[in-house]
Image (spheres, helix red, strand yellow):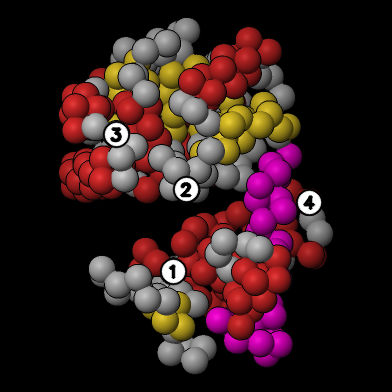
Amino acid sequence: MKNITVIGGGTMGNGIAHVFAQYGYNVVLVDVAAAALDKAMITIGANLDRQVKKGLLTEEQKADTLSRLQTQTNLQEGVSQAELVVEAATENTELKLKIFRDMDQFAPTAAILATNTSSISITKIAAATKRPEQVIGMHFMNPVPVMKLVEVIRGYATSDAVCASIMALSRQLDKAPVEVNDYPGFVANRILMPMINEAIYSLYEGVSGVAEIDTVMKLGMAHPMGPLQLADFIGLDVCLSILRVLQDGFGQPKYAPCPLLVNMVTAGKLGAKSGEGFYTYSPGSKELVVSKTFS
């Protein structure tokens, strides 16, 4: 397997494309928006520069990585030579189903179709194709070039051969793949999102403040980042979407998103990507400042 197509030029998509290209694969990065692809390539270049500065890559390796990356706004052309397609579009069920129907139509019949979804059923996504045995979840963690974990999620029909191939491929990327089964939230977000939601409830109910809640979890539980800062980093809209998948999938009130989270997303306060969530974010600044709403 040498030819990889990644669908989606956002944070996860450009990170996945970066890693595959860095490890010697020919990568086509696809997005309907040319501007998104331009931004993705700038981000990949900046992240490669960071790796060079840290001594993790040489300038020659950086140049080789970039030489293996192509961009494409036409999905049919982008997947035409792919042996593996990794979808990393917005966490929206209907959008993903449409993309998989299109990928199934245009990708070579032997190609494996993977999704980077963090919560949506692999079985449901696979059912939109005529090759469900070749559909699998490949859930990378953000930032992709740094984080080792890949959740490899088997759908109901995913074949043993496809699962073994993706596990092996993940190891070739110097990742640590963990095989899990297809239940709402898989493992990572089934555990993580209720914790984040409970932290938001603790703020909502006045138990403590933003910085204080995060400090308790960082210093008391040895978490590298507090749950409210992590929610901002993930995107509050993504957190809300995953919690709704958990709530719908399990039908239990414990997964109901906190009203504060719902209101913040409705107001467009999505975290780092919008400039404000539980903290405010200024370009170039590394200082963590609690949002005026909560200070």
Instruction: Kindly report the distance in space between the C-alpha atoms of the residues bearing marks 1 and 4.
Output: 27 Å
Q: Kindly report which numbered mark, 2 or 4, lies closer to the viewer in this rendering.
A: 2
Q: Which residue is mark 2?
A: 142
Specify few, some or many for label 1: CA neighbours under 10 Å numbering under 14, 14-19, or 20 or more: many
Q: Which residue is mark 1?
A: 271
Q: Which residue is mark 3?
A: 57
Instruction: Kindly report the distance in space between the C-alpha atoms of the residues bearing marks 3 and 4.
Output: 45 Å
Q: Is residue 205 above or below residue 190?
A: below
Mark 2 and mark 4 lie on one chain; the one further toward the N terminus is 2
Q: Secondary structure at mark 1?
A: loop
Q: Is residue 177 above or below residue 258?
A: above
Q: Secondary structure at mark 2?
A: loop
What residue is drawn where x is 46% and y is 83%?
Answer: 290
Q: Which residue is mark 4?
A: 250
Query: Residue 272, how many percent across, how many down?
Result: 40, 67
Q: Quadrant of residue 176 in the image? A: top right
Q: Secondary structure at mark 4?
A: helix
Q: Check disc 2 and give the amino acid type.
A: Asn
What residue is drawn where x is 44% and y is 43%?
Answer: 146
Q: Are marks 2 and 3 in contact (CB under 8 Å)?
A: no
Q: Secondary structure at mark 3?
A: loop
Query: Residue 112, how many percent across, how many down?
Result: 50, 17
Residue 197 in magenta stretch: yes
Mark 3 and mark 4 lie on one chain; the one further toward the N terminus is 3
Q: 235 left or right of 48? A: right
Instruction: Kindly report the distance in space between the C-alpha atoms of the residues bearing marks 2 and 4.
Output: 26 Å
